[in-house]
């Protein structure tokens, strides 16, 4: 029951599908940029930072709806981590686009 309280009410399970979102990629690589901390696949090579967990293969191990919930409530999942809270600077549609994009990794 406790784990279900960590889900985001804005997104029902199965809502977000993995897709090459142009908006999600722009937010991921430029606006936020997640690439400063996370390794990610691009053009057949792994690129990006090393201080955060690698996102290579994220789509194989993470549900897109879970990615959204994590981005929307980062501190709920990892209260002592250095991951910024994106719920303020990004609106729900932006978070959905990033989650869909990361799920393609």
Image: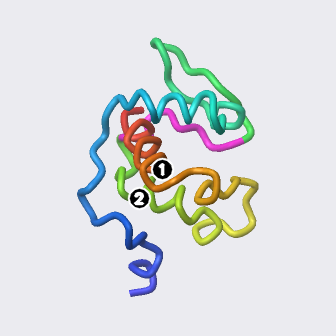
Q: Nearer the viewer, residue 22 or 59?
A: 22
Q: Nearer the viewer, mark 1 or mark 2?
A: 1
Q: Position of residue 11 (x, y in %)?
A: 34, 64
Query: Against 99, is 82 above or below?
Result: below
Work out which residue is located at the far left of the displayed protein and give it. 14
* Disc 1 to disc 2, C-alpha distance: 11 Å
Q: Residue at x 53, y 28 (%)?
A: 26
Q: Residue at x 45, y 38 (%)?
A: 102
Q: Residues within 10 Å of mark 2 (few under 14, many from 20)?
A: some
Q: Residue at x 63, y 28 (%)?
A: 30
| The C terminus: image quadrant | top left
Quarter-of-image position of residue 73: bottom right
Marks 1 and 2 in Cβ contact (< 8 Å): no
Number of residue marks: 2
Query: Against 16, is 19 above or below?
Result: above
Q: Nearer the viewer, residue 81 or 85?
A: 85
Mark 2 lies on a secondary structure that is helix
Q: Circle 2 is placed at which residue position?
A: 66
Mark 1 lies on a secondary structure that is helix
Is 41 left, or right, of 11 in this rendering?
right
Is 41 left, or right, of 54 in this rendering?
left
Q: Residue at x 45, y 32 (%)?
A: 23
Query: Against 40, is 53 above or below?
Result: below
Mark before the other along the chain sequence, 1 or 2:
2
Q: Position of residue 44 (x, y in %)?
A: 46, 13
Which label belongs to residue 95?
A: 1
Q: Position of residue 91 (x, y in %)?
A: 51, 53
Q: Nearer the viewer, residue 70 or 94?
A: 94
Q: What colour scheme governs how the chains and residues are painted in the rendered image of this protein?
A: rainbow
Is 21 left, or right, of 42 in this rendering?
left
Quarter-of-image position of residue 97: top left
Magenta segment, which residues?
Answer: 52-59
């Amino acid at each position: 029951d406790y784990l279900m309280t960590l889900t985001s009410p804005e997104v029902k399970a199965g809502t977000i599908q993995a897709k090459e979102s142009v908006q999600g990629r722009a937010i991921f690589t430029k606006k936020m940029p997640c690439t400063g901390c996370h390794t990610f696949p691009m053009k057949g090579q792994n690129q990006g930072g090393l201080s955060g967990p690698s996102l290579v293969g994220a789509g194989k191990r993470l549900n897109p709806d879970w990615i959204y919930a994590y981005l929307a409530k980062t501190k709920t999942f990892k209260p002592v981590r250095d991951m910024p809270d994106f719920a303020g600077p990004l609106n729900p549609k932006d978070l959905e686009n990033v989650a869909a994009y990361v799920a393609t990794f």
